[in-house]
Image (cartoon, rainbow, N blue to C red):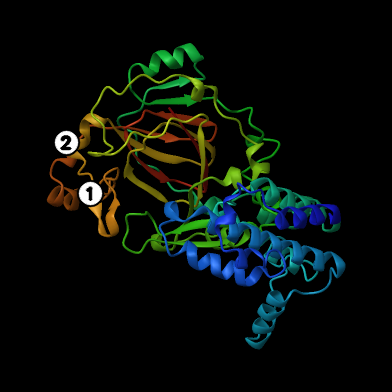
């Protein structure tokens, strides 16, 4: 560990002449890596001055490098005095004592034990660099530090998996989360693990396909089970890793919002209890969790179907007038979808072909062909110039009277549907509208490709 910290500090102190961090003022860079806190604050302000895609790379790099420098200092101090507290952790604990509350020392909690608050803080700093700044140019460096912390914890603290017998609540997600799905009247065509040739032939029909037994060999389905909360906590540094969470039933709802919390907080708050109020649901949605936590990426594999060549679109585009075509992908884009029963992805389209794999739980999915678009009432450009034309105005499962009054053509739109169960995947052709509702605790992975 000490050697890794020294190498990291050395890398932060030297920059190649072509490094875009050099676009930051020299007076600012001179404070790296000795004074990271004011640099983090400065870069943070710059990240919020521009739209994310327009933030100059130097400020994202500065936020990342300053965060790494701070994490290195926290780790070095923690290793030198494992029982000590960093200033921020001490201040939080002092505030809790003043309010008459003890620190949460349950296994897997943020603040897993009194000896590891410095680990909590270091992980938070590194994850914020990944989430806020995309770990600009430093993905491998951050992964190396987090892997070293995981090894440190493995050597110094027993994992939740080793203590499962004493903590049965972490064996599985609550059965109370399971909800009945609607009766399927218009089933999607299905097949059992079709060959590549058979799948390519099917793609020529431009129709969706429910596929059974396509990824039962994934470790996530058996020996490294994503259905085990204890396993997921172990893979996220005892639940310390930070994740972005959508709060609310669906992103089209007025009370929808976003927050960043630890994985353990996410499980405690949203996954391990039954939430009656849909506006209080939490959803880890369309997040590249596997770039952030590569150890989970090794539990799955990209379906071979994603390496086929899709046919050209047969229907008019649903991407809106004047939009550039989606980028050509060298590799499929992976996203995680993890949440409790009742979370919804509103009726929308995606710019790529999609294989949606259901690893844990069940989802109800309804699909409409692109030729039904005129009956689906796409949104337009909303406040702030946000283009929502890929999303329908209609709540697909709302009461008939409400829908008929506001969207009279919607009930005439033809659709197909399925209940996607564990071990099944769904091929969604590009341009097809789809509505998704979780019927239980659900963990899905989508693979976009073109």
Q: Residue at x 44, y 48 (%)?
A: 179
**Is 62 on the left-hand or right-hand side of 393?**
right
Residue 59 position within the rendered picture, expressed as x and y whole percent measured from the top left: 54, 59
Side of 179 where 87 appears, left or right? right
* For residue 90, above or below residue 122: below
Q: Secondary structure at mark 1?
A: loop
Q: Residue 85: where, in percent of width, then height?
A: 77, 74
In the picture of the structure, the residue carrying the numbered disc 1 is 380
Q: Who is closer to the viewer here, 117 or 434? A: 117
In front of the other: 435 or 325: 325
Whether residue 272 can be seen here: no
Give the image location of residue 3, x and y in percent: 85, 53
At x 70%, y 74%, the residue is 89
Q: Is residue 27 left or right of residue 248?
A: right
Quadrant for the N terminus in the image = bottom right
Please report contact status of discs 1 and 2: CB closer than 8 Å, yes or no.
no
Mark 2 sits on what residue? 412
* Rendered image quadrant of residue 383: bottom left
Whole-number angstrom distance, CA of label 1 to CA of label 2: 22 Å
The nearer-to-camera label among 1 and 2 is 1
* Of the pair 190 and 77, the residue shown nearer to us: 77
Task: Check disc 2 and report its element: helix, strand or loop.
Answer: helix
Q: Nearer the viewer, residue 18 or 419?
A: 18
């Amino acid at each position: 560990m000490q050697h890794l910290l020294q190498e990291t500090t050395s890398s932060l102190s030297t920059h190649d002449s072509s490094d875009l961090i050099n676009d930051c003022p020299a007076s600012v860079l001179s404070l790296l890596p000795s004074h990271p806190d004011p640099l983090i604050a400065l870069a943070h302000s710059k990240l919020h001055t521009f739209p994310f895609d327009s933030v100059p790379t130097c400020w994202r790099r500065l936020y990342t490098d300053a965060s790494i420098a701070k994490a290195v200092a926290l780790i070095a101090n923690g290793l030198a005095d494992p029982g000590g507290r960093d200033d921020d952790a001490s201040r939080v604990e002092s505030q809790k004592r003043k309010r008459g509350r003890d620190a949460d020392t349950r296994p897997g909690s943020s603040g897993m034990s009194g000896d590891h608050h410095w680990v909590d803080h270091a992980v938070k700093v590194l994850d914020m660099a990944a989430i806020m700044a995309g770990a600009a140019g430093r993905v491998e460096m951050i992964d190396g530090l987090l892997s070293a912390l995981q090894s440190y914890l493995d050597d110094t603290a027993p994992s939740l998996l080793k203590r499962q017998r004493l903590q049965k609540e972490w064996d599985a997600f609550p059965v109370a989360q399971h909800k009945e799905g609607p009766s399927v009247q218009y089933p999607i065509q299905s097949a059992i693990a079709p060959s590549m040739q058979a799948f390519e032939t099917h793609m020529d029909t431009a129709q969706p396909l429910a596929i059974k037994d396509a990824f039962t060999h994934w470790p996530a389905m058996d020996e490294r089970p994503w259905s085990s909360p204890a396993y997921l906590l172990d893979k996220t540094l005892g639940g310390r890793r930070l994740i972005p969470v959508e709060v609310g039933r669906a992103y089209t709802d007025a009370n929808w919002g976003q927050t960043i919390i630890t994985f353990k907080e996410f499980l405690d708050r949203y996954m391990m209890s039954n939430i009656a109020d849909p506006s209080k649901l939490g959803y880890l949605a369309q997040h590249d969790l596997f770039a952030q936590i590569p150890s989970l990426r090794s539990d799955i594999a990209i379906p071979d179907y994603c390496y086929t060549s899709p046919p050209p679109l047969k229907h008019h585009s649903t991407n809106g007038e004047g939009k550039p075509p989606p980028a050509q992908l060298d590799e499929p884009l992976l996203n995680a979808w993890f949440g409790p029963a009742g979370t919804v992805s509103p009726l929308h389209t995606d710019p790529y072909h999609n294989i949606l794999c259901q690893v844990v739980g069940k989802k109800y999915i309804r699909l409409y062909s692109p030729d039904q678009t005129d009956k689906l009432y796409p949104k337009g450009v909303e406040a702030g110039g946000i283009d929502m034309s890929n999303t329908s105005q209609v709540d697909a499962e709302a009461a008939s009277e409400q829908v008929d009054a506001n969207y009279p053509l919607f009930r005439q739109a033809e659709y197909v549907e399925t209940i996607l169960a564990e071990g099944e995947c769904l091929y969604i052709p590009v341009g097809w509208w789809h509505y998704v509702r979780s019927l239980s605790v659900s963990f899905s992975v989508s693979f976009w490709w073109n």
